Image: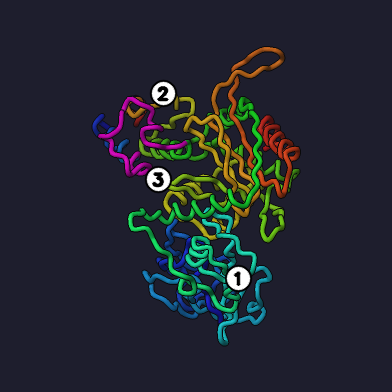
Amino acid sequence: MTQFVMPSLGADMEDAILVEQLIAVGKPVHRGDIIAAVETQKGVIEVEVFENGFLEKWLVPLGTRVPVGTPIAELRSDDASNLQEEPDMPQRLVSDHQRVQPRISHATPSLASNFPNKVRQRVTPAARRRAVQTGFDLATLGHEEIITLDDLPQVQQAPDTTPLSGMRQAIAAAMSRSKREIPHYYLSNIIDLTAAEAFVADHNADLPPEKRLLVGALFIRAIARAIEKFPEFNGLFENDQFLPNPKPHIGMAINLRGGGLVAPALHDADTGSLDDLMGRLRDLVERVRQGRFRAREMSDPTITLTSLGDRGVTGITGVIFPPQVAIIGIGTPDWQPLVREGQIVARRAATVTLAADHRVSDGHRGAGFLLSIIRNLQKPETL
Amino acid sequence: MTQPDLRDALIIQLGRIAPEIEIDTIDTAADLRDEFDIDSMDFLKLITALADEFACPIPEADYDQMRSFDEMLAYLKVHAK
């Protein structure tokens, strides 16, 4: 018998409300199935199960606010081999049960990424935040038990401060950590988009709206292809080490109505046709705007693309989402005077800016990475 | 479909994308994307919904004819079936 516990979906998450039980009692579950939906400060997130078995029973009713780490369902496994631990996920023995921790670490690369935690302690997000606020050293608490707010000294709050919303707190935590820890360097270049836009216009000419491409899909694919030659920009920097990821899971910075933004992963951006990629992009944006996305999409991005496509900015110098090591910003495409064969000509163009982590790469490689993206966009038919 | 009906239908579709924006508060002659704070993905979603509802293809080449709310309404008046 194993227990499925409420996952931590970021440093700001202390608990979440169970809003959907998507597997009925007695039904089989498979690794990767979405077992439940939980409501967090960032919206409704679907959580996956990482083992095969049967759902024995739900332990908490719908609508319950459940602290991170609390069992929400019991799973029965009919195969002893399924009880083996996932090699990459920390699990804890709880009496005679083995808790099934969904594969979401505290070090998610989402906007809600946590504060630095070099020792493998289990600390609730709220406790971690207060430790930073008060300068309290978590290392003095050991790592036997989960550290909660109760273990930490009280904070004196100024009476007239306006508390930040959950979304703003999450962004504040991730961006402050980024600026504190990551030695950014920045490079910009101009992308001539004439070929890419002509390709999209031609592609879309006879297609109904639901099948049309946006040039953004070409940006994503061009980045995914460039990553093949420049793997040092795609991965996570954790515990003083950079681990490149073999697949480009490109975080798409998506603004939310009502404030804030999230940057969930568009998985495997190097595979499938452009039409397929565009379909997945549409699906992702639509679900995010409805406040509904999957836990893996929050935890998996390996590099981020931010594009304020329609807001007229000439360029975007991004702040890297830790523990990622690069973010690419693309400004609004517009007519620009470029020189071609000695003549000034009006071309469609946009400024692309790379912000990258100097611990992992240098400007020379960064410049090559940008150039590779730009060259890929000159041959849109090969994307 | 009469013009008042078209206008209501367009407002309903815009409301699905930008529910917090009241039609009375926007400049119907100004850029629709700015007024409703919609990006290229929202716009594509809007066009998809309108093409479906009004049974007209709305080719991409016509996007320039529908920059504002007023222009979009005029376009639909001509092309809606």
Quadrant, the N terminus of chain A: bottom right
**Along the line of sight, the residue nearer the viewer: A259 or B35:** A259
Q: Determine the secondary structure under disc 1.
A: helix
From this viewpoint, is residue A276 visible? no
**Along the line of sight, the residue nearer the viewer: A135 or A179:** A135
Q: Nearer the viewer, mark 1 or mark 2?
A: 1
At x 49%, y 47%, the residue is A285
At x 53%, y 45%, the residue is A253
Label 2, on which residue? B65
Q: Determine the secondary structure under disc 3.
A: loop
Host chain of mark 1: A
A382 vs B68: above or below: below
Amino acid marked by disc 2:
Gln
User: Decide: marks 1, 3 in contact (CB < 8 A)?
Assistant: no
Residue A210 image position (x, y, % from top left): 48, 40
Amino acid marked by disc 3:
Arg
Label 3, on which residue? A257
Host chain of mark 3: A
At x 44%, y 77%, the residue is A58
Q: CA distance from mark 3 to mark 2?
A: 26 Å
Host chain of mark 2: B
